[in-house]
Amino acid sequence: MLRVLKFGGTSVGTLERIENVANIVKKMRDNGDDLVVVVSAMSGETNKLIDYAKHYSQTPNERELDMLLSSGERVTSALLSIALNELGYKAISMSGREAGIYTTSEYTYARIEKIETANMEKSIKNGEIIIVAGFQGVSSDDNRVTTLGRGGSDLTAVALAGALNADICEIYTDVDGIYTTDPRIEPKAKKLEKISYDEMLELASLGAKVLQNRSVEMAKKLNVNLVSRSSFTPDVEGTLITKEENIMEAPIVSGIALDKNQVRVGMYGVMDKPGIASAIFTALADANINVDMIVQTVGVDGKTALDFTVPVGDLIKTKNAMVAFQKDVQNIDYNEAIAKVSIVGVGMKSHTGVASKAFQAMANENINIRIISTSEIKISMIIDEKYSELAVRALHEAYELDK
Amino acid sequence: MLRVLKFGGTSVGTLERIENVANIVKKMRDNGDDLVVVVSAMSGETNKLIDYAKHYSQTPNERELDMLLSSGERVTSALLSIALNELGYKAISMSGREAGIYTTSEYTYARIEKIETANMEKSIKNGEIIIVAGFQGVSSDDNRVTTLGRGGSDLTAVALAGALNADICEIYTDVDGIYTTDPRIEPKAKKLEKISYDEMLELASLGAKVLQNRSVEMAKKLNVNLVSRSSFTPDVEGTLITKEENIMEAPIVSGIALDKNQVRVGMYGVMDKPGIASAIFTALADANINVDMIVQTVGVDGKTALDFTVPVGDLIKTKNAMVAFQKDVQNIDYNEAIAKVSIVGVGMKSHTGVASKAFQAMANENINIRIISTSEIKISMIIDEKYSELAVRALHEAYELDK
């Protein structure tokens, strides 16, 4: 069995923790598995290097920044390899280049183009445990080191698992899997055994600390069985993220996600002329703003209302983009005191009454729903932020997720 | 004019010092020179990484250790490149691999085999300032990163200067050149303007902090004009180390060196049988002990005395090697309280009376000379350690080196 394991910054945050990782790897190796281990930089290292660069420039040359940032993962890979060699195992560290990871030349956020597995396959055949420096590759055009941006080490692991046809790709963090909801909000939250790629993508906020959507999307595309588990409790099974067909009896609802990082933009008294909504959303798209939920209310006096949400981080960009439309609108208001609560589950597709149960649960708690949007496997509601936790707990109970 | 510049760990020891280096480079660039800049790891970085490795193993896997250690220089090269780009200069960092430095596979002490200059030449033609991560290359056999051992960054600079046919190779440290003797012993010591490779090699102890013999030897072999100067006083000219022919009127004596790191081994009552001396020195050579001065005194009663010096660091190895000869010798004693004083100068070749002046100077101060050895350009004397400084000052004055 070929496993790709990935250990994040916290899991390799100290010399002792790297030793702990060596012991996890050793145990798996003793079970006879072939192993490719992807490591991040020790926690804090990458930020330290960015601070160094910022000493010289607020906008450091990105090609050079990649040379700088790639060094953190190289250090971890060498240290883990040294630890494993000392334990008597043949381990070999590999940079992104040595692992055959070719990318675009978009420094600091390069995309993986192809993976040449020959070097890794030779090492696996030699009985070596491969320790890959995550987060990095080499540009096909310039033959320069590149980095893959946020979540880059996860992406490295998933891409290698796909290219090597690995049986499994395990992402180790300090969290032991994906829960039905945030346990800090609902202590009765339960860890999921399995979840589909699509559910995981919709539950991003639950797994945000654990898995980047970019990696889940790639796992889905490459059909990689992804496991989220903890390096601090390696004996505890994690959550398997896999394709829907692999999940026999999918629950109707898998989890409840909460997202407080949205702003509701209300545009009232919008001139009801053709193309105005289109113009607004085109302007937002051009400014690279990720609009989430949209509701348009047709008015009676030739005016309409538009409601939509954008990420808090895009608020200033949004306000700038809206300046051009002030003449077409009576009033624009921005409300940050909202939250998005989502119910996610592939079982929804084949069950009715899922949404009404959610609305009933909200009504029971006297929580007003401001905006609703639904997809095949998700129901999202915008509510006042102060009711966030209450709503999550009510929904968790309504769908009996603690059972 | 093509210059290769090399900045050591102290010169790039802090973010501010790297900025200082960027300004030195900028100034030279503004003069119109093409530049290849070799950098070491920030001071302390390499030791920190070695400590990390030692956490796992007293004898870390050397291939993996090289992956680890090579990262320090990569960081410095990227930072200097970022600083220069911010100043508006086109700079590009290069790893040993990118600079085309191919080495043997002797990890942690690899030797440079060849340098493929195509990549560097292309960058120079593009008007780019190249910042090379020193101390490292890539093994011709395994295509793995290697490191070059002690003084490796100097070696990188000299080798690149040779391969690129550079006009000059400047080694920047915190010392502004080579002095006639250690200024801490003789405040009247003067900085040398020029010195030949051979003199520099013999004066190793004077330049030990500044230049490794390995680099000087390579500079001699590749006919590279080497300059030792300081990054803290960049406007002060340093010392040029060049071939003898380039030094018009060489002084008879260039400098006085002092070496306190020798032990005198005295073997008394050695059986005067054929091959005994040969057996002793073969044993020492087999143990990789660098024997320096040797004197054999023929005895009267069929026994002889052997006196030689070895580095203090090899004392234990020496004692072990001598065990085999205890039966052939009446007594062996080890004296660490000695020092070697050397007078060096290419002018000696064509002048007589140089040695007698030294002996006279010692006699005037009542300093006993225990062993003497001479070469074409050097006279060395072993004296009691307590007279070291007195001897250096007396010789410095006798040869009028302060004039």
Image (cartoon, coloured by chain):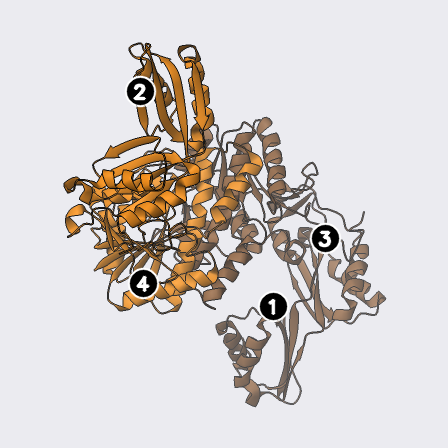
Chain colours: A brown, B orange
Which dot marks residue B236?
4
The answer to whether the residue labelled 3 contacts the one labelled 4, judged by CB atoms less than 8 Å apart, is: no
| Callout 2: chain | B
The numbered mark at residue A151 is none
Tag of residue B297 = 2
Image: B349 above or below A286:
above
The x, y position of residue A218, in whole percent, is 52, 50
From the viewer's perspective, is residue A293 above or below residue B150? below
Mark 1 or mark 3: whose residue is earlier in sequence: 3
For this view, does A356 lie left or right of residue B353? Answer: right
Rate crowding at label 1 as few (under 14), some (14 to 19) or many (20 or more) other CA atoms within 10 Å. few
Q: Position of residue A131 (x, y in %)?
A: 50, 39
Q: Secondary structure at mark 4?
A: loop
Reading the image, the residue beneath label 1 is A292
Q: Quadrant of residue A6?
A: top right
The residue wearing badge 3 is A253
Q: Which type of secondary structure does the marked residue at label 1 adopt?
A: loop
Residue A273 appears in view: no
Q: What kind of residue is marked 1?
A: Asp
Kindly identify the amino acid type of the residue bearing the numbered disc 3. Answer: Val
